[in-house]
Image (tube, grey):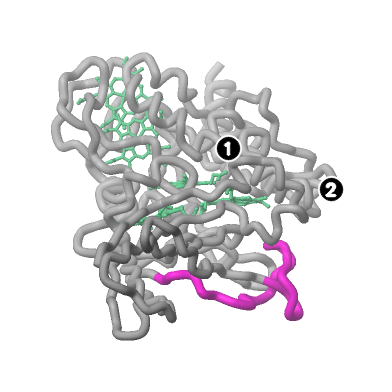
C-alpha cells in the first residue's frame, strides 16, 4: 500500500516538473467571469491555432516541420496548454495542432496565463515556468472575496503586477540563424505604462458575476487584429505647413515599434481636399523585411533584416510632402496597416482572405487651413 502511494507521489512530482500540465478549461471560468470570458473569446489569444487564423495557417502550411507532418514547435507559445505539449516540442514526434482537441482550442488559456510563476530567459525564446498548484491563480487585486472554485495568489507574482507576465512569449523569437524574427524589444517601463496597462486597460463591468465592481481589466487584448481603436491615443499625428511643402509627424508614444510581426505593412495615406475635390498624394509604407542573401525569405530561412523603415519605439517620424498648401485646403490623414504585406499575399495564397488583404484604418485626422 505505502509503496504504491510512494510511487504515485514520485510520479506526480515528476509530471509536475514536466512541461505539460493540466489546466482548467476556459469554459470553467465562464460560469463566474462571463464578461472577461466574452472579451477573451474575441481576442487573438483564443485564435492562436492555424485552424482559427488563416494567416497563421498560410505560414504553417509552408513550414518544413509541417511538410514532414511532424511536431508543432510553435505550440510553445501558440498552444501552451496543450495536453501533448511535450511531444510538440520534441523533434521527430508527430504532434500537430488539432482543432478537435479542447486543450489546443483553448489557445493561450486563462488558467495557463494565470499560473505563470516565473520566466526563464533564453537566447532563442524565453520559457514560462508554470506553478504546479492547479487551481490557484495569480491576480493583482489586494483584496477580494474568496472564490469557491479556486484559490487566489496576489503575493509573489510581481510579474502580474508589473506587466511582465507577457514577455515569456512576446519578448523575442530567434530562428536558427540567430535572427530575431519577432520582437517587442522590451523596455517595459514608460511613464508607468506597460504591456498590461496599454493592452488590458480597465473597462466597465465587474471582475466576476459574484462581485459588484465598477471595472475590470479588458481581456480582449487590444492589438492589430482586434480593438485597435483602444490604442489610438498612444500615437499622435500632427502637421507642419511650410512655404512650399508640408510635413506629417507621427509620434509613437509606445515602448515598441508600431507593428512587430514581419508580415505587417503600415501605410500612411494623405489626401488634400481642394474645392471639394480630392487630390491623393503618394502612400508612404513602413515595413521590416527579413531575408536571406539579399532576397525576402520566410521566417525560418531569413538570416538578416534587409530593410527596416518601421516606426520605432518612442520615435517621432516626419514625412515630407512636396505639395504647396493653399488657404481653405483640408488635409486628410489616415495611418493604418495591412496584417499581411500586399506584396506577399499571392505567394502565401491569402489574396482572397479578407483578414489578410483588407486595409485597417487605425487613426484618422483632418487638418484645415
Ligand atoms: C465559482 C465561481 C468562479 C469560477 C468558476 C472561477 N472564478 Fe475566478 N474568481 C471568482 C471570484 C468570486 C473572484 C473574486 C472576485 C473579486 O474579488 O471581485 C475570482 C477572482 C479571480 C482572479 C483574481 C483576481 C485578482 O486580481 O485578485 C483570477 C485571476 C481568477 N479569478 C481566474 C479564474 C480563472 C482562470 C478561472 C477558470 C479556470 C476562474 N477564475 C473560475 C469566482 C470564480
Ligand atoms: C516564442 C513564442 C512563439 C513561438 C515559438 C511562435 N510564435 Fe508565432 N507568434 C508569437 C507572438 C507573440 C505573436 C504575436 C506577434 C504580433 O502580433 O506581433 C505571433 C504571431 C504569429 C503570426 C501572425 C498571425 C496573424 O494572424 O497575423 C504567425 C503567422 C505566426 N505567429 C506563426 C508561427 C509559426 C508558424 C510558428 C512555429 C513555426 C510560431 N509562430 C512560433 C509567438 C510565437
Ligand atoms: C503563452 C504565450 C503568450 C503569453 C503569455 C502572452 N501572449 Fe499575447 N500572443 C501570443 C500569441 C501566440 C499571439 C498571436 C496569436 C495569433 O496571431 O495567432 C499573441 C497575440 C497578442 C496580441 C495581438 C492581438 C492582435 O489583435 O493582433 C496582443 C496585443 C497580445 N498578444 C498581448 C499580450 C499581453 C498584453 C500579454 C500579457 C498580459 C500576452 N499577450 C501574453 C502568445 C502569448
Ligand atoms: C495572456 C495572459 C492572460 C490570459 C490569457 C487571461 N488573463 Fe486574466 N489577467 C491577466 C493579467 C495580466 C491580469 C491583471 C490585470 C491588471 O491588473 O490590470 C488579469 C486579470 C484577471 C482578473 C482580475 C480582473 C481585475 O480587473 O482585477 C480575472 C478575474 C481574470 N484575469 C480572469 C481571466 C479569465 C477568466 C480568463 C480567460 C477567459 C483570463 N483571465 C485570461 C492576464 C491574462
Ligand atoms: C504605451 C502603450 C503600449 C505599451 C507599453 C505596449 N504596447 Fe503593444 N501596442 C501599442 C500600440 C499603440 C500598438 C499598435 C496598434 C495596434 O496594433 O493596435 C501596439 C501593438 C502591439 C502588438 C501587435 C503588433 C503586430 O505586429 O501585430 C502586440 C503583439 C503588442 N503590442 C504587444 C505588447 C507587449 C507584449 C508589450 C509589453 C512588452 C506591449 N505591447 C507594450 C501600445 C503599447
> Hey, which quadrant is residue 113 in on the image?
top left
Quadrant in which the N terminus is drawn: top right
Q: Secondary structure at mark 2?
A: helix
Q: Which residue in the protein does label 1 denote?
A: 20
Label count reads: 2
Q: Secondary structure at mark 1?
A: loop
> Hey, which quadrant is residue 130 in on the image?
top left
Q: Which residues are magenta?
A: 291-312
At x 41%, y 78%, the residue is: 323
* Residue 166, horizontal then vertical, whole percent: 41, 50
Q: Is residue 89 visible?
A: yes
The image quadrant where one finds ligand 4 is: top left
* Residue 241, horizontal then vertical, whole percent: 28, 77
Please check the rendered image and state whether residue 301 is part of the magenta-colored stretch, yes or no: yes
Foreground residue among 134 and 287: 287
Real-space Cα separation, disc 1 to disc 2, in angstroms: 25 Å
Closest to the camera, between mark 1 and mark 2, is: 2
Query: Which mark, by number, is residue 259?
Result: none
> Hey, which quadrant is residue 52 in on the image?
top right
* Residue 134, horizontal then vertical, whole percent: 42, 29
At x 62%, y 48%, the residue is: 357
Instruction: Categorize mark 1 by other alpha carbons within 10 Å: few (<14), some (14-19), many (20+).
Output: some
Quadrant in which the C terminus is drawn: bottom left
Please check the rendered image and state whether residue 318 is part of the magenta-colored stretch, yes or no: no
**Image side of residue 246 versus residue 161, left or right:** right
Foreground residue among 120 and 82: 82
**Image side of residue 298 versus residue 250, left or right:** right
Q: Earlier in the sequence, mark 1 or mark 2?
A: 1
Query: Which mark, by number, is residue 67?
Result: 2
At x 50%, y 55%, the residue is: 337
Amino acid at each position: 500500500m505505502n509503496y504504491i502511494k510512494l510511487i504515485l507521489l514520485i510520479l506526480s512530482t515528476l509530471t509536475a516538473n514536466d512541461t505539460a500540465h493540466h489546466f482548467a478549461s476556459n469554459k470553467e471560468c465562464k460560469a463566474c467571469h462571463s464578461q472577461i470570458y466574452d472579451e477573451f473569446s474575441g481576442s487573438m489569444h483564443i485564435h492562436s491555432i492555424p485552424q482559427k487564423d488563416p494567416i497563421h495557417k498560410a505560414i504553417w502550411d509552408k513550414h518544413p516541420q509541417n511538410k514532414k507532418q511532424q511536431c508543432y514547435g510553435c505550440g510553445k507559445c501558440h498552444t501552451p496548454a496543450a495536453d501533448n505539449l511535450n511531444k510538440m516540442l520534441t523533434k521527430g514526434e508527430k504532434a500537430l495542432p488539432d482543432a478537435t482537441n479542447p486543450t489546443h482550442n483553448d489557445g493561450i488559456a486563462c488558467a495557463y496565463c494565470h499560473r505563470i510563476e516565473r520566466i526563464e530567459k533564453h537566447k532563442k525564446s524565453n520559457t514560462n515556468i508554470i506553478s504546479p498548484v492547479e487551481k490557484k491563480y495569480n491576480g493583482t487585486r489586494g483584496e477580494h472575496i474568496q472564490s469557491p472554485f479556486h484559490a487566489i495568489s496576489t503575493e509573489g507574482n510581481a510579474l502580474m503586477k508589473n506587466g511582465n507576465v507577457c514577455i515569456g512569449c512576446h519578448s523575442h523569437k530567434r530562428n536558427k540563424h540567430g535572427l530575431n524574427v519577432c520582437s517587442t524589444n522590451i523596455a517595459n517601463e514608460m511613464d508607468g505604462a506597460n504591456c498590461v496597462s496599454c493592452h488590458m486597460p480597465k473597462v466597465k463591468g465587474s471582475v466576476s458575476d459574484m462581485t459588484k465592481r465598477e471595472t475590470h481589466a479588458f481581456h480582449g487584448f487590444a492589438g492589430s487584429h482586434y480593438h485597435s481603436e483602444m490604442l489610438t491615443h498612444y500615437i499622435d499625428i500632427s502637421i507642419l505647413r511650410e512655404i512650399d511643402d508640408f510635413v506629417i509627424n507621427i509620434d509613437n508614444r509606445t515602448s515598441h515599434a508600431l507593428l512587430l510581426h514581419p508580415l505587417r505593412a503600415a501605410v500612411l495615406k494623405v489626401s488634400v481636399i481642394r474645392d471639394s475635390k480630392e487630390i491623393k498624394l503618394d502612400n508612404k509604407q513602413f515595413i521590416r523585411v527579413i531575408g536571406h542573401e539579399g532576397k525576402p525569405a520566410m521566417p525560418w530561412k531569413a538570416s538578416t533584416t534587409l530593410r527596416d523603415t518601421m516606426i520605432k519605439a518612442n520615435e517621432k517620424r516626419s514625412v515630407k510632402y512636396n505639395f504647396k498648401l493653399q488657404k481653405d485646403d483640408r488635409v486628410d490623414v489616415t495611418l493604418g496597416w495591412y496584417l499581411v504585406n500586399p506584396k506577399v499575399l499571392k505567394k502565401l495564397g491569402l489574396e482572397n482572405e479578407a483578414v489578410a488583404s483588407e486595409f485597417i484604418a487605425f487613426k484618422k485626422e483632418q487638418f484645415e487651413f
